[in-house]
């Protein structure tokens, strides 16, 4: 049964969803039921977000997070499906009127980051990542996404009888990437049949974003976020005492040369006047003692591109650099480039984005919807966008008075989300949902 606090939302919804000439306006006003839902559920969404923030879990390890999500969905009278892609949770809200089918997606996993904030609900969690004990933190805002989608679900259930169509709620694990040797994330959700029995005609998702101030939304048609590929290079030398480097082959020096020469791939071999590209190293590991030159050194890194031709050329260039620079040092290399399937470019369907832009403008005001530049960050939401017309948008999360340019970014141990962004995300996603369900395609 709907929460009694939502009775006002239901009444407003029934009146608002009735056919009227106002529904034909190019730029819709913010729906009264959206305003009401924001007021009624503001604290509830904050509470959900704080709980998930305090108890984060790494990719493919979201056992308690998914359990809590399923419990909240059952409280709403829904019948969640669990265990998709390990810990994914879905549920369908069936409206009382005929209409289209859409999907709304939120991600649930956290990062191997030790939090450096003094929040009362700051994470104290630890786990194991790449064989090391690490702190765990929702440093990317997935706790916010999960709380927002639960809030949207509660609002939609509250107006279910008047709602046209059906909405698939998708709570996804492992957006940040499955651990080595495992499958996960959006690709596995699709492989496990998330759209098998419920094929939506559109999918929507959002992401809180530190580079945008709270109160603003960022969206652009076409490519939005880069393709992401990871790689592993292992330079193999020959161990020797640090006092006798000539007695072996130093993989540390060889790897240093590989890393330095790799910088020329983007700066000298890639036409970045067309589209941007990035090659970055994220971790290096080799040796254990100050006076022993080790047998091998391993690095891992990421490649970001927007064009398939550029992507393949960078793969080839990186293998070439690693092979020949290592050989010049008398070393060998094992190059896994890429070392998994990676994420495709996140592309917003141009027609769908143009159609829903007025809905975002209604939520925060036309002046507060901006077109961000291409983002080198990646999102596995891109897998859904390859299957179904989709729109992904950013919700500003940096508090007023703080420069978003210098604010701690997503993935920082000091990432700090202004909780006013939860209300913005709730209202924006709910407005988009209701406007799409009401507006016929065409």
Image (cartoon, rainbow, N blue to C red):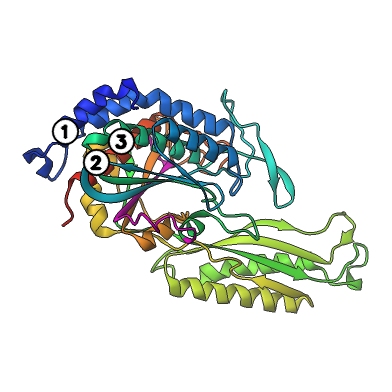
251 to 206, vertically: above or below: below
Name which quarter of the figure residue 198 lies in: bottom left
329 to 154, vertically: above or below: below
Q: Are marks 2 and 3 in contact (CB under 8 Å)?
A: no
Residue behind mark 1? 16
Verify whether residue 132 appears in magenta: no
- Please tell me which residue lies in front, 1 or 360: 1
Q: Secondary structure at mark 1?
A: helix
Direction from residue 106 to residue 438 in the image, left or right: left
- Please tell me which residue lies in front, 188 or 315: 188
Between the C-alphas of marks 2 and 3, the distance is 9 Å
226 to 404, vertically: above or below: below
Residue behind mark 3? 156
Residue 225 visible in rendering:
no
Upstream in the sequence, badge 1 or badge 3?
1
Name which quarter of the figure residue 382 lies in: bottom left
Residue behind mark 2? 434
- Please tell me which residue lies in front, 260 or 428: 428
On the image, the x and y values in percent for residue 395 come to 37, 40
Q: Secondary structure at mark 3?
A: helix
On the image, the x and y values in percent for residue 31 come to 21, 33
Residue numbers of the magenta segment: 191-214
Direction from residue 187 to residue 91 in the image, left or right: left
Residue 50 visible in rendering:
yes
Residue in view at x 65 percent, y 35 percent:
125
Q: Are marks 2 and 1 in contact (CB under 8 Å)?
A: yes
On the image, the x and y values in percent for residue 40 come to 33, 23
The furthest residue to the left: 21
Q: Which mark is residue 343?
A: none
Between the C-alphas of marks 1 and 3, the distance is 13 Å
Between the C-alphas of marks 2 and 1, the distance is 10 Å
């Amino acid at each position: 049964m709907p929460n009694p606090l939502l009775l006002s939302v239901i009444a407003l919804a029934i009146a608002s969803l009735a056919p009227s000439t106002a529904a034909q306006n190019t730029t819709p006003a913010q729906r009264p039921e959206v305003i009401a839902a924001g007021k009624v559920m503001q604290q509830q969404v904050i509470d959900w977000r704080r709980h998930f923030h305090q108890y984060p879990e790494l990719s493919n390890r979201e056992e308690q997070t998914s359990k809590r999500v399923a419990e909240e969905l059952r409280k709403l009278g829904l019948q969640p499906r669990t265990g998709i892609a390990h810990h994914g949770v879905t549920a369908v809200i069936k409206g009382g009127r005929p209409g289209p089918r859409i999907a709304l997606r939120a991600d649930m996993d956290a990062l191997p980051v030790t939090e450096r904030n003094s929040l009362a609900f700051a994470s104290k969690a630890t786990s194991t990542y790449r064989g090391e004990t690490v702190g765990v933190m929702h440093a990317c805002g997935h706790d916010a996404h999960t709380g927002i989608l639960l809030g949207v679900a509660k609002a939609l259930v509250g107006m279910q009888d008047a709602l046209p169509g059906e909405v698939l709620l998708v709570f996804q694990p492992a957006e940040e990437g499955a651990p080595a040797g495992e499958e996960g994330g959006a690709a596995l959700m699709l492989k496990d049949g998330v759209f098998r029995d419920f094929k939506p005609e559109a999918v929507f998702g959002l992401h809180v974003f530190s580079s945008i101030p709270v109160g603003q939304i960022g969206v652009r048609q076409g490519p939005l976020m880069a393709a992401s590929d990871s790689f592993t290079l292992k330079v193999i030398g020959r161990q020797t005492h640090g006092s006798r480097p000539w007695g072996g082959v130093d993989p540390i020096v060889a790897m240093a040369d590989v890393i330095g020469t790799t910088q020329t791939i983007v700066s000298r071999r890639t036409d970045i006047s067309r589209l941007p590209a990035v090659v970055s190293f994220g971790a290096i590991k080799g040796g254990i003692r100050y006076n022993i030159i080790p047998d091998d050194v391993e690095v891992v890194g990421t490649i970001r591109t927007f064009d398939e031709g550029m992507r393949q050329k960078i793969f080839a260039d990186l293998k070439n650099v690693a092979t020949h620079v290592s050989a010049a040092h008398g070393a060998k290399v094992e190059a896994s480039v890429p070392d998994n399937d990676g994420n495709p470019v996140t592309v917003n369907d141009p027609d769908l984005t143009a159609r829903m832009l007025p809905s975002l403008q209604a939520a925060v005001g036309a002046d507060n919807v901006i077109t961000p530049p291409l983002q080198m960050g990646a999102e596995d939401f891109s897998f859904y966008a390859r299957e179904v017309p989709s729109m992904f948008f950013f919700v500003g999360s940096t508090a007023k008075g703080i420069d978003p340019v210098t604010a701690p970014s997503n993935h920082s141990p000091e990432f700090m989300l202004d909780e006013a962004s939860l209300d913005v995300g709730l209202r924006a996603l709910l407005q988009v949902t209701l406007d799409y369900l009401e507006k016929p395609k065409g």
